[in-house]
Image: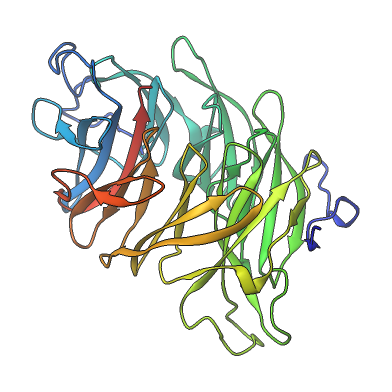
Amino acid sequence: MKATVFFSSTARILFSSIMFLAGCGGLSNTIAAPGAAGSAQGTSAFVYVLSNPSGNNFAINAFSASSNGQLTALPGPAFAANVQTIAANRNYLFGTDGENIYSFSIGSNGALTRISSINAVQFTPGSLGFLFLDRTGSTLYDKDFFFDGANTGDQSFSIDGSTGSLTSVGGIPVEWGSSLSFVGSNLYGYTSNNFHFSCMIDALKRNNDGALTFYFRSFLDNPPGAPAGSGYCPGAIAADQANHLAIAFSDATGPGAPPPSLNGKVALAVYTADSAGDLTSTSTFADMPQTAAGDVLAISPSGKFLAAGGRSGLEVFHFNGADPITPFTGLLMNDPVDQISWDNDNNLYAVSRSTSKLSVFTVTAASVTQAAGSPYTITNPTAVVVVPRK
C-alpha cells in the first residue's frame, strides 16, 4: 500500500495566477550547408554540444549518432557563436544570448538554419538564463533572473510548429529552482526549491496554451521512512513518460540542520503523480539507493533506466516505475559530469567540462558499454542536446 502522500491537495498553497545563438558579427545563418552532411539515413539522433574553447569564444559541435551511439562529426569546423545555453525539440533548436531567443530549424542532415528571433527581456526586467521545453516540445520556457526585479521566474513561449517562431504567453515568478520536470500527462511540472534552506518542491500547472500557473508548494524536509532526527532536502528531479518522478535527496544544510548522514551522497526516491498532481510514494528511505553522483538526473525514453551524474561521476540505475529504484552499474566514470541526455536507443551522453570530454554509453538490461570512439575530446563542453530522429 502507498506509504506516504507528501503533497496533498488540501495542503496546497494556491496562488491566484499570480543558449542561444546570438546574432553577433560574422555569424552565418547555417551551421552546415544543406546537403553537406549527405543522407541522414541510418542516423539515430543528432547531437549538439556547446563548448567554450577560450575566453568568450563559444562553439557548437554537431554530430550524427548511429543506433549504437557512435558519433560522426558533421562536415566543417565547429560553428563559432556567442552561445550561453540551448534546448531543442525534434524540428527546432533554440538559444539565447541573455536577451534574445533565437530559433533554428534542424535540417534532415542536421544542419541548423536561423529562422527567427524574439526579444524576451521586453516582457520582464530580468536577464535570461537556461532554456527548457515541455514534454511535447510545443512550449519553450526560460529561467529568467530578476524576473520581477527581485525574484527569478519562468517565461513561457508557444512554438509555431510550421515556422519555429515564438510567441510570449506570459510568465510567473518562481523563487529559484531548476528547469521543470514534466510528468507524462504534461499537465504538471516539478522543481526543487531550497531557497534560504527551506527544502521545498514547487509544482506548476501547464495550461492549454503552455502558460504556467503556480499550483502548490510543499515544505519537504524528509523522504518517506527517514530516520528520526534526520533532515534531507530535495535536489535533482527527473520524470518519465508515465507519471513517475525520481528525486535526489541530500543532507539538509544551513542554520539548525541535523547532523549529516549521507556523507556527501544522495538518496534516490521515486514518486507517482496522480491526476490532481499530488505525489505519493511506495518506497521508504531504507530501500532508496544512494549514489555519489546525483547532481543531475535523466530517465531514458524507454522508462527503464535512470542516469545520475555529478561531481563524482556517472552511474546508471534500473528505474521501475512506481516501484523503488534499484542499483545497476556503480560508477561508470569518475570524471565530473555537468549534463546528461538520452537518445531513443538507450544511448547515454555525458559532458564533463573540467576534463573536456563527451562520453557515450550504450545501456541494455544486462550491461552498459562505452560506445566506439568514446570519449570524444571537446574543449570545455558546457551542454549537450540530443535530437532523436526515430
In depth, the one of 318 and 93 nearer the eye is 318
Q: Going by the image, does 272 lie left or right of 107?
A: right
In which image quadrant can residue 362 be found? top left
Residue that lies at the very extreme toward the left in this rendered image: 76
Residue that lies at the very extreme toward the front in this rendered image: 366
Quadrant (top left, top right, bottom left, bottom right) of the C terminus: top left
- The spot of residue 386 in percent (x, y) is 34, 35
Image height check: is 240 above or below 177? above
Residue drawn at point x = 87 percent, y = 57 percent: 11
Quadrant (top left, top right, bottom left, bottom right) of the N terminus: bottom right
The figure's colour scheme reads rainbow
Q: Going by the image, does 276 lie left or right of 74?
A: right
Q: Going by the image, does 185 lie left or right of 125?
A: right
In which image quadrant can residue 309 be found? bottom left
- The spot of residue 35 in percent (x, y) is 16, 11
In depth, the one of 323 and 74 nearer the eye is 323
Image height check: is 165 above or below 332? above
Tell me if residue 52 can be seen.
Answer: yes
Residue drawn at point x = 25 percent, y = 22 percent: 110
Image height check: is 306 above or below 335? above
Residue drawn at point x = 52 percent, y = 33 percent: 122
Residue drawn at point x = 60 percent, y = 47 percent: 153
Residue that lies at the very extreme toward the bottom in this rendered image: 259
- The spot of residue 155 in percent (x, y) is 58, 37
- The spot of residue 230 in percent (x, y) is 67, 84
Residue that lies at the very extreme toward the right in this rendered image: 10
